[in-house]
Image (cartoon, grey):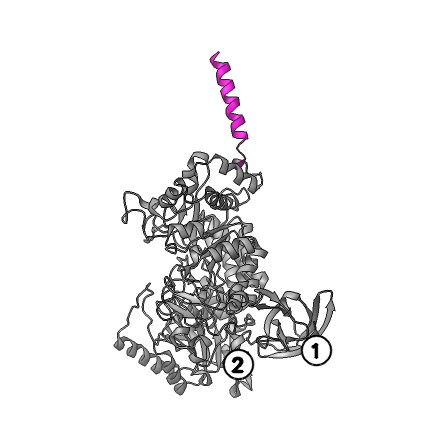
Amino acid sequence: MKKVLFTAMFAAACTMVGAQTYLDPNAPVEARVKDALSRMTLHEKVQILHAQSKFTTPGVPRLGIRQLNMADGPHGCRAEIDWNSWGYANWNNDSIVAFPSLTCLASTWNRDLSSVYGHNVSEEFAFRGKDIMLGPGTTIARCPFNGRSFEYMGEDPYLAGEMAVPYIIAAQKNGVACCLKHFFLNNHEVNRMTVNVNVSERAVEEIYLPAFEKCVKQSGLWTMMGSYNKWLNVHCCQNDSLLNGILKKRWGFDGAVISDWGGCHDTWEAATGGLDIEMGSFTNGMTADNSQGYNTYFLADPFEKLLREGKISEDVLNDKAARVLRTIFRTAMNPKKVIGKQCSPDHYAACLKVGEEGVVLLKNEKIKELKNASILPLDASKYNKILVVGDNAVRNMSEGGGSSELKTKFDISPLQGLKAVYGDKIDFAQGYAAGRPMYARVDEVPAETQAKLKAEALEKAKDADLIIFIGGMNKNHQQDCEGGDRLTYELSYGQNELIAELAKIQPNIIAVMYAGNPYATPWLPQVKALLQCWYLGSMSGEALSNIISGKVNPSGKLPITFAKKKDDYPCFQYGEEGYPGVNDQVYYKEGIYVGYRHFDTKKVQPQFPFGFGLSYTTFKYGKPTVKANGENFEVKVSVTNSGSREGKEVVQLYVGDLKCSVDRPVKELKGFEKVSLAPGETKVVEFTITPRDLQFYDEQSHQWKSEPGKFKAYIGASELDIRGAVEFTL
């Protein structure tokens, strides 16, 4: 009898398990979500909407639904953080590959490399057991002082969107969710938690939303991070107009919105404003309220109380819970999620490749002593003693920067990379000291220390045949770092003066600058070459030495405009109201004229234009042609490598409206292709101009529209270096 009863109970249990669709890894995600929701209590649904530690949210243990594990990105998986504090856990096995900064990735203008980046970096997240990578970022570079610009992809929404989409697709294919950030208008760090951004509807639609929209619609983005700032006087992490109105309803986003850490401020607004997962609020889980801990979050007990009182519909809760479950089944409980790997040879190879293609050659002067050849690539046989000067030659650039700082297994410094190629010919002088990377404060270096380092460099310069100055910015506070903006457009630590004095002693100077933002270059006439390196990650030194030695031909192009002086940027032309704001209100009075749109249309000459970058070879463009194809227009142009070295060229398509009822930029980026060409080789590059490419946002009708008339397609090697143009009529 007992045996019969046990058999019946066992059969019933098996039937019950079989009916649990949410546990069937092969069932469609939506079926799993619907089934799990039907089995969860109201309390369990609330629980999965907020943190249970610094970087995890709970699952549903009773039902076997796993928690979500997150980690900062987007350039690598951040070192393990303590459960309830911001301290590092000091693991021995969380050292990773630091991939180049996203400004560097954008500088490659190479969609295929973006996919390689997303695949490789997500493997490291997967191996560490992470389900959500907090990145990438497509916030527009409005202000050259922004401490987080190095985490983003430049000033143009088309370029940023095109480069982010392949990254996200590749990462999510591995079962790791990308959390695109920061949505939106997080264009500077000063007063980021309180500032309200006043911006025109047209600028929102044409400049600040398109990259995010493209990622949602073309990559199938799984999670989005709200920004700290306010828009329409409501914090973006709980902004109904932004999160429900635009993101979820208009764009059809079916994923989860995650707050930036501490970005949630109110239970009612968070509940009704579209936030799905609340992270990093006022409590650290223990000391702020050790009787409640994470249950004191806005979307925890206070939200549950409103639900049980009937003040908020349970439909709101179910929508949020469904989005979180959808994320869990796409990641933590995704049977196709990769195991991944960490610090593998192919990861370092990908890091190196992105770095090599992201370096931008900005100047390369011809030298009489070299029979009128350019100083780069550097022929070691022409020099007996090469002096490397600069703090960045030996600095670990993976450290600092705020939440994107990384703990690496190793980093090849620029000095190490150059010594590996040029050996004993290399001597080194630090020249200046930048201090330790600290968050929210500056490590001041004594003036006497700086003077001593400078004197040493100037003395060594007397014996040098060539100087390679390796400087720029770093990831210290008020350099390129979260939580603070730069204070000046000039380089810090007395670098401008040091370069000028070195040039008086030895005029053969190659300047190498690491930075995530543009900067003033008053010493430009005094140096023979300038390389913009961004932050190149773990393989920094090898990438740099490969470019300098000529092993690799530089092919990077600027994703941001370098102005001659700070006040040339439009954000600085309206006083403090334009940046950083007055009384927590900032006004984007330049409207759509951000970056090159301003410089081009207002006829302000930049130091280096958007899309600019030199090569060790030359490229000749043919005459472009345009032909209507249904609603679209097809543009073709031939490009020939007219030099003696193999190289890659970024062919850029800009489109201008020749006559319109509203002000429009002279031209806007609408296409680009990176082509590799052997000496003498010719390839035909084709572009498609769609109806949307010709439209502007009309604030009267609140719609996108285009007007019949003449347009012009510009083909260029940069925004200013136009090699051909052709008109067409809509």
Residue picked out by circle 1: 623
Mark 2: which amino acid?
Lys
Front label number (2 vs 1): 2
For residue 186, side relative to residue 443 (left or right): right
Dot 2 or dot 1: first in sequence order is 2
Q: Main secondary structure of the magenta part?
A: helix
Nearer to the camera, 566 or 400? 566
In the image, the segment drawn in magenta is 1-22
Percent coordinates x, y for residue 568 in the rendering: 46, 80
Q: Residues within 10 Å of mark 1 (few under 14, many from 20)?
A: few
Residue drawn at x 28%, y 72% as measured from the top left: 445
Q: In the rendering, at what x and y percent does residue 215 appear?
A: 55, 58
- Tell whether position 16 is magenta: yes
Along the horizontal axis of the image, is 325 left or right of 647?
A: left
Residue 184 vs 37, above or below: the answer is below
Horizontal side of residue 298 vs 543, given as left or right: left
Q: Position of residue 602 (x, y in %)?
A: 53, 81
Q: Which residue is mark 2?
A: 602
Asked which quadrant contains residue 683, the reply is: bottom right
User: Residue flagged by tag 1: what amino acid is it?
Assistant: Lys
- Find the distance from the CA under tag 2 to the CA under tag 1: 28 Å
Q: Position of residue 510 (x, y in %)?
A: 46, 79
